[in-house]
Amino acid sequence: MRSEAEGAVPDEEETVTSAEEKTADASDGPADDGKGGNDEKDSADDDGEKKKKKPGSFWKELPVLIVVAVVLALVIKAFAVQAFYIPSGSMENTLQIGDRVLVNKIVYHTRDIHRGDVVVFNGLDSWDPETHISKPTNPFSKALRAVGTAFGVAPNEKDYIKRVIGVPGDHVHCCDAQGRVTVNGVPLNEKSYLYTDPVTHEQNKPSNEPFDAYVKPGQLWVMGDHRELSYDSRSHRGDPGGGTIPTDRVIGRAFVIVWPLNRIDTLPIPDTFKQAGFKTASMAAPATPMALGVLGTLPIAYLRRRRRRP
């Protein structure tokens, strides 16, 4: 008889047997070919491994993976690359309404802004919004708009995208005898990127209105590729900057279209901006203070040498 300490064993626990007991039972039965016992043991081990790897654990890890992915995306957006939504046609045909572009936010920490670059900049307190977007009316919509703006799937009315025509020290003028924009007296051939009507195939003129501007240090002269539609530096000449924008408001350089898929393309600098003629003015400006500094040290060096002489 069983002692009271052992107690009664529940029915469901009595049905559970170990692998060793199964092997012992099998030995009492009919003889096999010598392989059956091992096969049963292997299958029992496989069943144990399957029980340890439960598929439900993936769904427990999924929220953590999503949070990590969002955090990484926000870090990349803040410091390296950010997506932007194109809300207007001011850069057609280069960029269409609804395009998404990636903007390199590191490049201008390694080099200066170049003529021909397509840049995204913040126009807060300097330019009026080019596109007026209705604001969300409820907290949920505001949250969706904030997330969409952060990931480049919703427009931001304070950010602009234009092409750099003049950099600090440049003289930008329109138009010469052939109706072209000139930079430091060198005409631009803009046919490769100016807006062309898809129906009439008529291309925009470089500008329907004349202008003459000197780009001050720390400023940029920018224009849209759709010159008849773009509200750019030409339209802001009455502002304190004379139409130019501060270089420190530039967020980065747009370098590729990533959406829609049928419009994936890079945004290189057009060949006309690679001319050597108009590089002189902008390159001479930074060199001038350095040259003056060198000249200023010459008298000091001369006096020191005179004092050292016996």
Image (cartoon, rainbow, N blue to C red):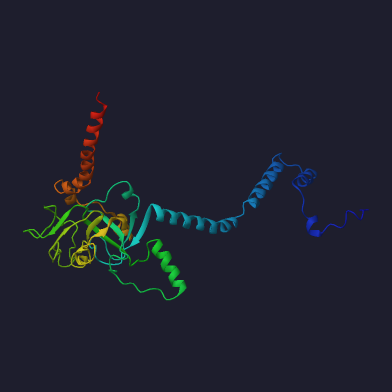
Furthest residue in direction bottom, as rendered: 137
Furthest residue in direction front, as rendered: 310
Furthest residue in direction left, as rendered: 177
What percent of the width, then of the height, locates residue 179?
A: 9, 60
Foreground pick, 37 / 269: 269
Can residue 70 be seen by looking at this rendering?
A: yes
Can residue 255 be seen by looking at this rendering?
A: no
Is 302 positioned to the left or the right of 58 in the image? left
Indicate the quadrant where residue 236 lies.
bottom left
Please, is residue 99 above or below residue 48 in the view?
below
Please, is residue 125 above or below residue 75 in the view?
below
Foreground pick, 1 / 242: 242
**Residue at the spot x=44%, y=72% of the render?**
141
Indicate the quadrant where residue 227 lies.
bottom left
Foreground pick, 93 / 282: 282
**Residue at the spot x=23%, y=29% of the render?**
306
Indicate the quadrant where residue 88 lies.
bottom left
Is 272 positioned to the left or the right of 247 in the image? left
Is 186 positioned to the left or the right of 108 in the image? left
What percent of the width, then of the height, locates residue 109?
A: 33, 48
What percent of the width, then of the height, locates residue 240?
A: 24, 64
Please, is residue 258 above or below residue 131 in the view?
above
What percent of the width, then of the height, locates residue 243?
A: 22, 63
Furthest residue in direction right, as rendered: 1
Looking at the rendered structure, the number of numbered marks drawn on it comes to 0
Image quadrant in which the C terminus is located: top left
Foreground pick, 254 / 113: 113
